[in-house]
């Protein structure tokens, strides 16, 4: 017994010693990481990109493998709001008026989305990243009005029988009333609008959508379906699918990042956790 205790003690000592070394190494590495340096480097890279973009009706989205040129998307693409959002963040960090003016130009190109019939749930991506940051940093009241209109447009996709927002109207034949895990990232627009002069029902829509997503799309192990299919008339949950992942029952890694429960008001996060 004494031998066993001695061996266990030795093993614990080794484990704690290793953890201590790892912890010290991590602390040393962290101390070398300078946030301001990284932010400044990013701002400079963003400035370099803006110098090459003399038009504002297309938005840089990605660079293909083995290529050095940007691939661009038009206003209606779901990624169109990301680049203006990046410009606003770069302006916020640097105070550079050139970046601010670029952010304004690319942001204001997206205005029509707020006043057009909702093609999909991506309105939050498109306009809260762009106009949302623009309003936050400038207080431009026109931006506020556009955001409120955008929230109302997004709310037209809500089905009260299901309790969630329709993600892809074009996919109704295949998935019925479909709600995707990505849609969580759009709720911030609705919560913001409800607090800033929009209809209070926008809060209830966003809250209900979050609850239904947690109930039906998030599995017991914390992974998530990409798509939840619901009966349009009864609201009954039919099945969970993947659309871009490996299989219906697999974890779609990008979707885990899109499942933005932490962008919700904290009291809603706690409520969702307690209920489910």
Image: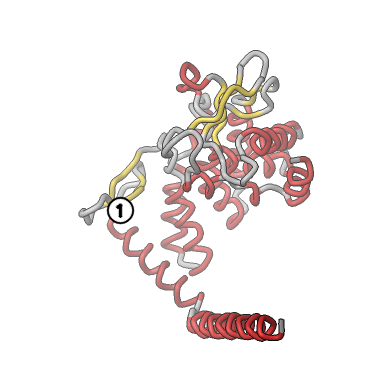
Quadrant for residue 229, please give it.
top right
- Taking the spot 33% from the left edge, 50% from the top edge, the residue there is 62
Which quadrant would the C terminus be assigned to in this image? top right
- Taking the spot 76% from the left edge, 34% from the top edge, the residue there is 200
- Side of 275 relative to 233 (left or right): right
Work out whether residue 146 or residue 151 is closer to the camera in this orientation and state it.
151
Residue 127 percent location from the top left of the image: 53, 42
- Side of 90 relative to 138 (left or right): left
Work out whether residue 15 or residue 231 is closer to the camera in this orientation and state it.
15
Compared to residue 238, the image places residue 213 above or below, namely below
Work out whether residue 128 or residue 239 is closer to the camera in this orientation and state it.
239
- Taking the spot 43% from the left edge, 43% from the top edge, the residue there is 79
Quadrant for residue 153, please give it.
top right
Would you name the residue on which mark 1 appears?
Answer: 53
Residue located farthest toward the top when viewing the structure as drawn: 233
- Side of 241 relative to 267 (left or right): left
- Taking the spot 62% from the left edge, 40% from the top edge, the residue there is 219
> How many numbered markers are drawn?
1
Compared to residue 255, the image places residue 36 above or below, namely below
Residue 233 percent location from the top left of the image: 64, 13
Residue 40 percent location from the top left of the image: 44, 73
């Amino acid at each position: 017994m004494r031998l066993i205790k001695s061996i266990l003690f030795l093993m614990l000592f080794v484990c704690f010693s290793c953890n201590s070394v790892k912890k010290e190494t991590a602390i040393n590495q962290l101390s070398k990481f300078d946030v301001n340096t990284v932010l400044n480097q990013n701002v400079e890279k963003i400035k370099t990109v803006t110098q090459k973009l003399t038009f504002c009706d297309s938005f840089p989205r990605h660079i293909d493998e083995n290529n050095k040129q940007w691939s661009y998307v038009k206003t209606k693409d779901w990624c169109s709001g990301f680049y203006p959002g990046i410009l606003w963040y770069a302006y916020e960090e640097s105070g550079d008026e050139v970046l601010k003016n670029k952010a304004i130009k690319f942001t204001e190109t997206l205005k029509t989305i707020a006043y057009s019939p909702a093609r999909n749930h991506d309105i939050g991506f498109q306009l809260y990243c762009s106009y949302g940051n623009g309003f936050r940093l400038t207080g431009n009241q026109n931006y506020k009005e556009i955001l409120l209109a955008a929230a109302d447009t997004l709310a037209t996709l809500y089905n009260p029988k299901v309790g969630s927002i329709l993600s892809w109207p074009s996919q109704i034949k295949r998935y019925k009333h479909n709600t995707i895990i990505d849609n969580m990232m759009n709720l911030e627009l609705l919560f913001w609008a409800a607090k800033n002069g929009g209809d209070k029902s926008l809060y209830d829509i966003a809250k209900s959508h979050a609850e239904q997503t947690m109930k039906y799309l998030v599995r017991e192990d914390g992974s998530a379906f990409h798509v939840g299919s619901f009966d349009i008339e009864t609201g009954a949950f039919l099945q969970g699918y993947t659309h871009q992942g490996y299989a219906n029952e697999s974890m779609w890694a990008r979707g885990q990042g899109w499942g933005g429960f932490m962008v919700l008001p904290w009291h809603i996060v706690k409520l969702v956790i307690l209920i489910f």
